[in-house]
Amino acid sequence: MSATIKAVDPRTGIGIAEYPEATRDDVDAAVAAATSAATDPALADPARRAALLRAIAQRLQQREDQIVALAGSESGLPPARLQGELARTTGQLRAFADVLDRGAHLDAIIDTADPAATPPRPDIRRTTVPIGPVAVFGASNFPLAFSTAGGDTASALAAGCPVVVKGHPAHPGTSTLVAGEIAAAVADAGLPEGTFGHVLAADHAIGGALVDHPDVRAVAFTGSGAGGRALMDRAAARPVPIPVFAEMGSLNPVVVTEAAIDARTDAIVAALTGAIANFGGQLCTKPGLVLVPEGDAGSAFTDALAAAIGAREREVLLAQPVRDGLGRGLQALESAPGVAKLTDAEAIDRGAGFHARPSLYRAAAGDLGTVGTLGEEHFGPAAVVLTYTSIEDAAAALVRAGGQLTATVHAQPQDHQQLQPLIDAAARVAGRVVFDGVPTGVAVTWGMHHGGPYPAASDGGAHTSVGMTALRRFQRPVAFQDAPQELLPPELRDGNPMRIVRRVDGVLET
């Protein structure tokens, strides 16, 4: 009898359905189909890939009610959040299709020959090509936008790479439903079946087999630091190592100046409370550290934040492992030297279902880096207030915190002259620096960078997992030297037959 994965409603802890779990044979079959698709001329056609992405978006929109209801029952997330997440999912699929329409993914560069140069310069023309089959690991906390049809899948397909998704066991029904719509869109588009594959698994051995498969060329992952590091190590140990593009969470420190506290405490407290507690605090950009100045202003701000967080109702967590992991982490935090708990309620609710009550803690910024648990991500509705003595002290704390997805600064115009050391530190450790806002909510744009120095991301922040440039993870450049015109890819031929933006002899041309 084959193994199954049970879908559980996290609000009650009761199982609601079971789905068959993939086997190693299923992995082999999916990757074999993807390998065949990788060299199919149909998948190489950007117009057909653009049409596929738009067709997937349309199919998902047509099933919105069913998708939102199923995802809600498996994740505990409210309908409004899931409707917004589905809109984000379909929007980024269409946005990548637009990239393909414009040929922007090709990054075409032409350096014409110059026989008079010393030494003589040959004709060099560069474009990009897809790297091959990509293994995508769905994320638990975004069952739509970072899962089966999420940004990794969309960007890999846009790059021309077949995708094999390992569906997340926290939302097996949602992953299966969405995978069926993608597969149907592939068939309708006349693309090879191996363009998209789906293997549903809770067993780590199945995910390991996918990473180990010699025909997989890259891995994309969103999740915990431990999970991402395990994939990195496994991929590096292959006879032919492959890249793992892992986004692994973050403390997302927020620095608040005394002037900002004096000017807008209520607004900042309200924004931070939502960012820390909304959706169970299960966002990769949830603020986990809030740095405030020592003294009366910082104390008053901390009291207001603690009161607001303590007044929140309990939050639903995605699954039992999330609840149990948060419980262990907060227990260690509460017993750490110099750490005080500021909210009264017990953080972990052991009743029916998987819940936690938002909680806030306090320590000194100087302890960050010496008290180990202060530098750990607590995935859930919890945060730590750190008190700093000066802007330089706050900047030093950011550096000690290490690589982050984001760093945020709340300040007033009169602060700006003294903030440069803090901004320099933020830019040094974070992939995105936010001013006077909250880091939650990651816009899908050309300018977005969702990554950061390790351990926020596996590749030191060189690539983003969100935004139009995310597809660059799944391409590699190829240069052609002194090639005959008829043997060049169309995007590199004289006359610009594709009518795309190109860089010719250093100058952008359209």
Image (tube, grey):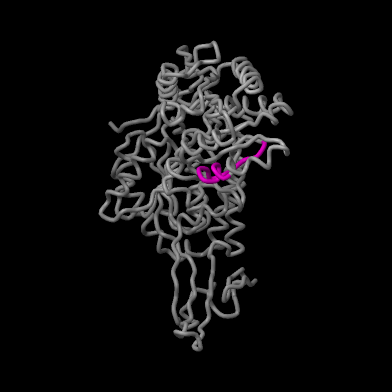
Q: Position of residue 374 (x, y in %)?
A: 45, 27
Which is nearer the eye, 420 or 380? Answer: 420
Please identify the residue farthest to the bottom as the structure is shown: 116
Q: Position of residue 327 (x, y in %)?
A: 43, 19
As for residue 426 lying within the magenta part, the answer is: yes
Which is nearer the eye, 462 or 211? Answer: 462
Q: Is residue 199 left or right of residue 401?
A: left
Q: Residue at x 44, y 17 (%)?
A: 334
Q: Which image quadrant is residue 20 in?
A: top left
In the rendered image, is residue 146 in sight? yes
Q: Position of residue 229 (x, y in %)?
A: 36, 40
In the rendered image, is residue 15 in sight? no
Q: Position of residue 91 (x, y in %)?
A: 62, 47
Q: Residue at x 51, y 65 (%)?
A: 45
Relative to 213, is 411 above or below?
above
As for residue 257 lying within the magenta part, the answer is: no
Which region of the structure is painted magenta? 424-436
